[in-house]
Amino acid sequence: MNVITGASGHVGANLTRVILERNEAVRVLVREDRRALEGLDVELINGDVLDLESLLRAFKGARIIYHLAAKISMYKHDEKNMFRVNVEGTQNVIKACFTCRVERLVHFSSIHTLSPFPKDEVLDEAREFVDERKLSPYDRTKALAEKEIEKAIDRGLDAVVVCPTAIMGPFDFKPSYAGKTLLDIYHGRIPALIDGGFDWVDVRDVVNGALAAAKDGRSGERYIFSGKWYTVREICEMVRDITGCKIPRMVVPMWLARGFAPPVTLAARVLGKSPMFTSGALYVLRHYKYISHAKASKEFGYKPRPIARTISDLFKWFKDFGYLHNDL
């Protein structure tokens, strides 16, 4: 039995479908939003990673646990909730794994738990954890969660950690931050581009990598699932070439964007909207340029597809599911 926490999220929606396509049983832990799972032949367990009893029900008789559930936010005031879900929730997952004697835990971490320095050297799995004092609340809590996994491995838990970069791709029901950004580009809601970039990877490649890690990954190891680094302008140009939409011509220098980040974030919070960019997001766009997935490629043939194909598939999915309406 495969069990997935966070199955209603972007990665979870894709992972659930691929496992089902392999004719394997899937049990999912869900709270409220079930859009990504409608019509799928899965066993639903109502629960939460903060509810240990629900985890014990979900993990009973399980062979592999895929722990994806996480609280994602750009706001510092959400740090308390992120700590509870990302850190305390992971502690509960670990307890349930030991109690239910699961064979293997696949923990989804983040590339942002790893230090971007030295900035101009290739980042791989051997990189140290980032300095927590300089992290955004999300990155800080994900780093703390990964450290909890390391402690559990030392206590005998069979676990592997996967660290994807920025994910995009189909079955993005909510949509994710990346999906919403691409929709904003399509609808002309972004007045100017920012001078920076990041490493982007297809969600389906991350899922295939995680399944390979579950089967062939070495216990206690971390595996990076990256794609390729692109500037913000290059991503926008791909969206334009695929959809025919117009994109901004102006590129805001990083120094200017950094000055505007605090008021932009505050205004978005007051209006109840997601900020176009935050200081943390701008930090990411200035770092993490050279990321290697050589370890995963060598050990189980991980090979990410071109991101232009990903964007094309995503917009086809957006269109098929009616997500290109201007009110989304």
Image (cartoon, grey):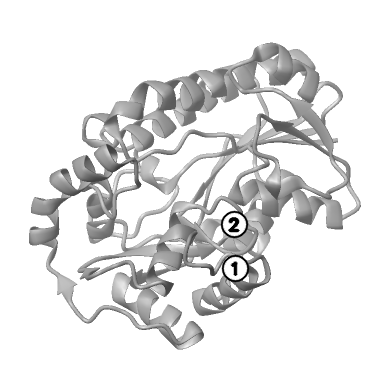
Circle 2 is placed at which residue position?
172
Which is closer to the viewer, label 1 or label 2? 1
Q: Is residue 247 left or right of residue 94?
A: left
| Residue in view at x 83 percent, y 49 percent | 40
Residue 119 appears at what percent x and percent y?
A: 23, 56
Q: Position of residue 137 (x, y in %)?
A: 32, 32
Of all residues shown, which one is farthest toward the front?
Answer: 327
Q: Is residue 309 visible?
A: yes
Q: Are marks 1 and 2 in contact (CB under 8 Å)?
A: yes
Number of on-image labels: 2
Judge whether 308 appears above or below 6 on screen.
below
Local crowd at mark 1 within 10 Å, few (<14), some, or many (≥20)?
many
Q: Amino acid at mark 1?
A: Phe
SS class of the residue under badge 1? helix
In the rendered view, would you say 116 is above or below 70? below
Residue type at tag 2: Asp
Left or right of 288 in this view: 327: right
Image-quadrant location for residue 121:
bottom left
**Along the polypeptide, which appears first: circle 1 or circle 2?**
2
Per the model, the C-alpha gap separating discs 1 and 2 is 8 Å
**Element under label 2?**
loop
Image height check: is 256 above or below 278?
Answer: below
User: In the image, what residue occupies the spot 55% across and 24% down?
Assistant: 90
Left or right of 316 on screen, residue 189: left
Q: Residue at x 72, y 17 (%)?
A: 54
Whole-percent x, y for residue 201 in the image = 51, 63
Q: Image check: 161 left or right of 37?
A: left
Q: Which residue is mark 1?
A: 318
Which quarter of the figure has residue 157?
Answer: top right
Mark yes or no: residue 216 visible: no
